[in-house]
Image (cartoon, grey):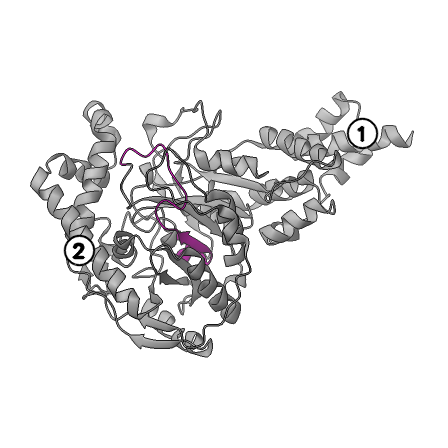
């Protein structure tokens, strides 16, 4: 009798993960499950589970103090409760996730060795191809696209035991740092739903901030991991190119775009990077270091470490609220033992190099589709593609030369300093109905990426850069600080970010939308 009851409870829990509350009793009756156990099946875990660190959640699952199904149930209920307010997760696969969670629990019961992310629910950015799960790229041309294969980062996450629950919103083809598209609409900032969450990994950042997932993947060309992290009070890490290989990249030698981790803490970012990182022979930029290198303790002494503090990056504008919040953190680095000096490298040529190379990339990526479906593209991306199609060989060559010169100047600069510190964004979150800000501190912005220079200047260097919560504006909007490290010194960046995070604890503040 006891055995039959236990089996019924297990079936009830699995059922509860795959149907809405309204269908639970009816479906349970069809399966012969006693009505008395059905409500309990949905109370296996509460919202507190959703704000555990990813590392702690994984530890509890390995110890069998929390099942993968309970963790999934808690997150699905959080999504049901919060996602309608913010529109972060745009595709949800609860039945597929429930089956994976059951398999995860059964494998653990059999004594199989769990991966580092065993049983953790995760949603992938909607630019990442997922086998059998809609991947729309934020474009009406792909609204019914179901890929036949997983991208490499999805394969690695699944091998580590993560459970896919769906996809997070992104602007059309990831173009721009305001997450909206005609397929799914806009994703809203959980600290003020009238504001943008940034982008292009905006859905991922909001889902993390709201406790809908414990970890998220993202990607970054001009700030797409860092901008939304700053706007949502979480951590986003643009790693060194090749740290997370992309064997499918059309521009295999380009250092502008890279995938990377996002989380609510630096230690969880390191945990996720330990899974995402590692060599792949199909990627020419692939770095040889194994991902397990990022599981080392993050603590270290910063006594005597020299840090360069930004000035104005050659004259780009910053909103006074952002500058004030970031400048207030200088004393934190000094309290850690760092010597902080106001200094910055020469960023001349960055504007021409980045805009030219980005337009070239956009034109190459979209040329064939664009010729057939020009009107299906948003106007800002359409103009960028057209700029790229008009490029001459000499213009592309000039951009590559300027890019190389900037890279060398930056590496020389960081021979004097171990880190460069600057704001992640140039202004706080703006109106969600505005495609992009047209001015910053009274200075006109002439394109949809002009307001993101504090990020894409750093993208050009190829150096690892992380955005960490750094406080709030007087209106309560999050501000991020950007820590840039030496060439390939990703772990060093994590160490300083962790020390700053532990000293300030800004990331512990939860958004009103929760």
Circles 2 and 1, Cβ within 8 Å, touching? The answer is no
The residue wearing badge 2 is 405
Q: Is residue 392 above or below residue 312?
A: above
Residue span colored magenta:
228-251
What's the residue at 48%, 35% (across, down)? 154
Specify whether residue 240 is painted magenta: yes
The residue wearing badge 1 is 8
Specify whether residue 238 is painted magenta: yes
What's the residue at 44%, 47% (across, down)? 289
Give the SS element for disc 2.
helix
Name the one closer to the observer, 459 or 111.
Answer: 111
Name the one closer to the observer, 465 or 15.
Answer: 465
What's the residue at 71%, 39% (across, down)? 42
One can see residue 511 in this view: no
Q: Position of residue 372 (x, y in %)?
A: 21, 22
Q: Position of residue 28 (x, y in %)?
A: 74, 26
Side of 147 where 68 appears, left or right? right
- Front position among marks 2 and 1: 2
One can see residue 311 in this view: yes
The rendered magenta stretch, by its main secondary structure, is classed as loop
Side of 372 where 140 appears, left or right? right
What's the residue at 19%, 36% (across, down)? 385
């Amino acid at each position: 009798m006891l055995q039959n009851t236990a089996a019924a409870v297990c079936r009830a829990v699995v059922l509860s993960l795959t149907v809405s509350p309204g269908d639970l009793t009816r479906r349970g009756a069809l399966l012969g499950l006693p009505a008395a156990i059905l409500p309990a099946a949905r109370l296996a875990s509460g919202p507190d589970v959703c704000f555990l660190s990813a590392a702690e959640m994984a530890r509890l699952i390995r110890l069998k103090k929390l099942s993968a199904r309970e963790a999934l149930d808690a997150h699905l209920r959080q999504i049901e409760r919060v996602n309608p307010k913010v529109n972060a997760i745009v595709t949800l696969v609860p039945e597929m996730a429930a089956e994976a969670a059951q398999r995860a629990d059964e494998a653990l019961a059999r004594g199989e060795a769990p991966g580092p992310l065993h049983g953790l629910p995760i949603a992938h950015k909607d630019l990442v191809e997922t086998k059998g799960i809609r991947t729309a790229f934020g474009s009406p041309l792909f609204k019914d696209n179901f890929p036949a294969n997983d991208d490499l980062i999805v394969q690695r996450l699944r091998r580590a035991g993560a459970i896919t629950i769906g996809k997070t919103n992104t602007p059309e083809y990831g173009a721009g740092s305001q997450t909206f598209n005609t397929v799914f609409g806009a994703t809203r900032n959980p600290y003020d739903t009238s504001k943008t969450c940034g982008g292009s990994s905006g859905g991922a950042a909001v889902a993390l901030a709201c406790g809908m997932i414990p970890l998220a993947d993202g990607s970054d060309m001009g700030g797409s991991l860092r901008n939304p992290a700053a706007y949502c009070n979480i951590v986003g890490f643009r790693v060194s190119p090749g740290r997370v290989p992309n064997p499918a990249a059309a521009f295999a030698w380009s250092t502008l775009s890279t995938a990377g981790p996002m989380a609510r803490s630096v230690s969880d970012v390191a945990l996720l990077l330990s899974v995402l990182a590692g060599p792949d022979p199909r990627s020419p930029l692939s770095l040889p270091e194994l991902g397990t290198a990022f599981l080392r303790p993050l603590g270290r002494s910063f006594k005597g470490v020299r840090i360069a503090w930004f000035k104005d990056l050659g004259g780009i504008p910053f909103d006074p609220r952002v500058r004030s919040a970031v400048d207030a953190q200088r004393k934190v680095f000094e309290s850690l033992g760092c010597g902080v000096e106001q200094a910055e490298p020469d960023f001349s040529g960055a504007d021409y190099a980045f805009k030219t190379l980005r337009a070239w990339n956009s034109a190459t990526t979209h040329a064939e589709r664009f010729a057939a479906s020009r009107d299906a593209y948003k106007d800002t991306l359409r103009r960028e593609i057209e700029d790229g199609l008009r490029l001459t060989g000499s213009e592309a060559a000039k951009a590559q030369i300027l890019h190389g010169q900037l890279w060398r100047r930056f590496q020389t600069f960081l021979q004097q300093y171990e880190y460069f510190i600057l704001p992640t964004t140039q202004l706080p979150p703006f109106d969600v109905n505005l495609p992009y800000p047209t001015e910053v501190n009274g200075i006109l912005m002439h394109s949809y990426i002009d307001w993101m220079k504090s990020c894409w200047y750093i993208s050009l260097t190829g150096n690892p850069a992380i955005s960490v919560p750094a406080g709030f504006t007087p209106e309560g909007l999050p501000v991020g600080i950007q820590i840039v490290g030496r060439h390939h010194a990703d772990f060093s960046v994590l160490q300083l970010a962790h020390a700053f995070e532990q000293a300030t604890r800004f990331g512990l503040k939860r958004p009103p939308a929760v």
